[in-house]
Image (cartoon, rainbow, N blue to C red):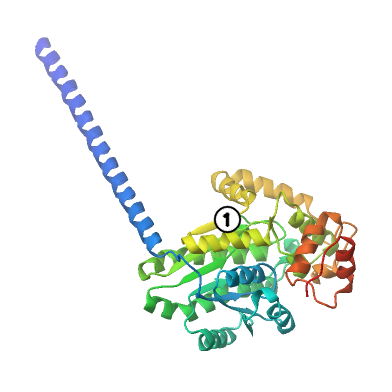
Amino acid sequence: MKAGLGKLSTNGREHGVRSGRFVREEVTVKLKTKLLLLAGAAIAAKALSRSLKLRRLEGKRVLITGGSRGLGLVLARQLTREGARVAICARDASELERAAADPEIEGVLAITCDVTDQHQVQELVRRVKEEFGEIDILINNAGAIGVGPVETMDLQDYEETMGVHFWGPLYLTLEVLPEMRARGAGHIVNVSSIGGKLSVPHLLPYCASKFALTGFSEGLRAELAKDGVAVTTVCPGLMRTGSPRNATFKSKHRAEYTWFSVFDSLPLLSMSAERAARRIIDALKTNKAEVILTMQAKAAARFNALFPETMAALMALTNRLLPSAGGIGHEKRLGADSASALSPSPLTSLTERAASLNNEVGPADSALSSIATRAGVVRVS
């Protein structure tokens, strides 16, 4: 009896081993099948991506929002050199007029438009189509930056930035999309921000609206791939466009402007607008899903994805180092009206130069003109 039990026990163990081996083999087969399916899907997606590439930009009809200054103007210059037919829009008519007079974008179509107004957007697209025909490429670039601690940010601040960064791109997309889908061709570039992947203290309305744009842009690419329409999401880090002087600042506005403009100028932390524009155009040509500009921004985005608790602690520490609430409170001041001992100064010379070159400075701005002259900057109006 004991021998029989022993034999039964041995058979049971052998059966268990065989069963375990069978289960492991079955799991291995399923895993390999899934990996093969994923590899096949990746190859198919890459092939589809290649089919959507814009090999050449010559003759392409491009609409750039926020094209009167900063990155938008630099993009217009470079796309014009590529042989594209370019239309730019901005809400400031005098600023737009100065941009249109830029010899590097001679022949550009310049139209006044506030992208937060859907009716103005509809009229903008109608006029561009009337002049050029169908739009091949839409670059949603218009932006607005408001800086200050959370206790000074009002509902209006959030509404305004959502209008520029989310509703504006949505209105434009809805206007150009039907024809792009009907043609089975077209490309939409949404200029978001690293602030649309990692929220930064004292920029909450800005970051919240950029997160909305990033989410819209990523989902839009997935849904439009089947229609032959490409979407690229651009997330710049710090760029030397000259924009800080046209940003708005609250609370201790001079201190806020100082840290913002100094960091924006440092060559090891920031990228020139010209280089950023080249990277964006390369991404447009090769149909990249996403491009994050500056190595520091890319590293920050990855670190936040991998170690969110640590990044949250670092952001909390950063917030402690930023100016506390006070000063002018909820009132707003332009960066141009927030000068301090350190800004403008040699520390911000690269940003001041960019402001002069990229139409961030009005011709009547004598204060910056004298600063630029002392720094050896040539004014371009």
What is the crowding at mark 1: few (fewer than 14 residues within 10 Å), some, or many (at least 20)?
many
Seen from the viewer's position, the closer of residues 20 and 122 is: 122
Please count the marks in the image. 1
Image height check: is 262 above or below 90?
above
Q: Residue at x 71, y 48 (%)?
A: 268
Image height check: is 322 above or below 329?
above
Percent across and percent down for residue 143 are 65, 70
Visible residue check, residue 186: yes
> Which three-letter amino acid code belongs to the residue tagged 1?
Ile
Q: Secondary structure at mark 1?
A: strand
Seen from the viewer's position, the closer of residues 204 and 268 is: 268
Seen from the viewer's position, the closer of residues 366 and 193 is: 366
From the image, which quarter does the N terminus lie in?
top left
Percent across and percent down for residue 172 are 53, 78
Q: Quadrant of residue 178?
A: bottom left
Q: Residue at x 90, y 62 (%)?
A: 374
From the image, which quarter does the C terminus lie in?
bottom right
Q: Residue at x 41, y 65 (%)?
A: 52
Q: According to the image, label 1 marks what residue?
A: 292
Percent across and percent down for residue 286 are 47, 60
Q: Residue at x 64, y 49 (%)?
A: 296
Visible residue check, residue 324: no
